[in-house]
Amino acid sequence: MKAPIVIVVGGGHAGAEAALAAVRAGASAVLVTFDIGRIGEMSCNPAIGGVAKGTLVREIDALGGAMGECADGSALQFRMLNRSRGPAVWGPRVQSDAALYSKLVRKSLEEAGVILVEDEVTALSGPTERLSGVRLSGGRLLAGDAVVIAAGTFLRGVLFRGRQKWRGGRTGDGSSFALADDLERRGFALGRFKTGTPPRLAGTSLDYSEMELQCEDGPGFLFSFRGRRFGAPSARMPCWVTRTTGKTRRAAMSAFGESPLFTGGITGRGPRYCPSFEDKVVRFPERSEHVVFVEPVGIDSPLVYLNGLSTSLPEQAQIEMIRSLPGCSEARVARWGYAVEYGYFLPGGFDGTLRAAGSENLFFAGQICGTTGYEEAAALGLLAGRNAAAAALGKPLFEPDQAWGYIGVLVSDVTCRGLDEPYRLFSSRAWSRLHLREDNAPLRCLPWALEMGVARPGDADLLAVLEQDADKARSALESCSAEGVRALDLCRRPEIDERDLVERYPELAELDRESFRSAVLDEKYRGYVDRAARRMETWRRLHGLSLNSIGDFRSVEEISWEAREALERARPSNLGEASALPGVRPSDIDGLLVHLARTGGVPRGTHGS
């Protein structure tokens, strides 16, 4: 029997994972993109991972995705972010060779048998309720049994630099206006968001002696629990740190009259946690300097990326800003920064399976769902591709739960909350973040990969080994004892880590290292995880709890400033309404309960601590 065809529109991180997941789930996949040579391109920063994002990459890997393997195969430097916090919220991140990463993504697609088509999708074909395929430029029909739209920033994408404005999803590419028009005719509402990118410099034009060297934490980390599939780059490369100065600030401010952000050229909201430099100047007037990371783009690339200096100011302002940075006084610009404003689907246009409203076989994925970031896009692509294949095969669709992974948190947030800015994943968005760790991602997600039908060959055997190693590690912690103290009891102390335990109980050194580490963290956080589960149950029980006793949400010290602003703006009447607001995280709901208990708005102990 011939496999049904899933058509994927877009060759970015979401589109690549969608096509691969569709194939693993039993369909054939055809991926349509403007330029096959730019599949899997890192359009902005040359890096994968970070806080929460790194854990998401490990979940994608456990679910059979390619992002982790491609990141491992192109890694120039590894760092573990958030080390000042507990290991539950550490964030693995790799600096990538951008060209090599793109090459490995394409190789993954070709090895999986994905058909690559270089063209533009101008419209969907057939009734929205049951599509028959897509229309390509020139009117040619590409027939398919399900469609995934993963158009990134290309839906009505418009680029800005100073007073310049031109169509495009990124520099050097076109924009999908015809497809956006067709989608609106079919009843899908599009909002507008904005993002931006920094200038790229010629690395040989910089004086690194005026910057701080940023070395890696070590080359041993891998995102993929399956090991290296693509080998490793021929060299490791450091990053550097410089800082903006008062001169940088003045150069930016002098060009505000030509900034599309302030002249009304751009109306879409940008990402709060990745602002342009001109945004930083306005939002943080008290800051005398901002950190700028000087990151290599690749081993064979002469370019460096200025992480922290995203801008859409005119070229003259950009060069003045750049040359005000220590180490950059003679800098040569290879590519100017710019902003892109693009269309995204408003919440309500798709459900928790990422299927479009009113359709049996149309799915949305990636940045068009309102997210920002490669990792978020890839996770949504994987789910959309799997469910598109399931729809084509007549199988049940899958909706991830928040309890088993960050992918569930991500899907829940983009489908259930209103979005007033591009959505970025954080560990604080998860109720059970102490359980959703990077170390246990394979053990958490492999069972779901098998249930979803997206596991790799041999994954069932790998899961059996992981479960056996986990049981062995847990049993060893229970049985090992020295001077009347069990290892299990000792590892609950905050200051004790795996090395301390091995020093005291040498037999523990024989355990599988990763399984041993996970077992220690499971026990260390067990009480907190149980408490979080009780808090979640409390929140469900107190969904209708009144917030009318709070006169000014900006004075609630137990919640984030982002939540204070969102709550004061919306003035929700109860806890349920508050939890649905963009910018309000589970940690903020917990903070509201603590505040109400402290001020007498609810009986003490209600917050479940």
Image: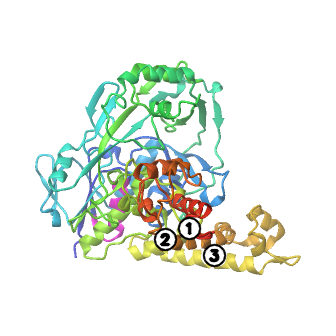
Q: Which percent across, then down, holds residue 567?
A: 45, 52
- The prevailing secondary structure element of the residues shown in magenta is helix
Which is closer to the viewer, label 2 or label 3?
2
Query: Do the residues bearing badges 1 and 2 touch, measured as CB atoms within 8 Å?
Result: yes
Q: Which residues are magenta?
A: 14-28
Which mark is on residue 542? 2
**Label 2: few (<14), some or many (≥20) within 10 Å?**
some
In the foreground, 509 or 347: 347
The quarter of the rendered structure image containing the N terminus is: bottom left
Tell me the residue at 35%/54% (across/down): 366
**Residue 402, image x, y percentages:** 46, 67
> Which image quadrant for residue 108?
bottom left
Q: Amino acid at mark 1?
A: Val
Q: Which of the two discs, 1 and 3, labels the residue nearer the N terminus?
A: 3
Q: Name the quarter where the C terminus is drawn.
A: bottom right
The residue that label 3 is drawn on is 469
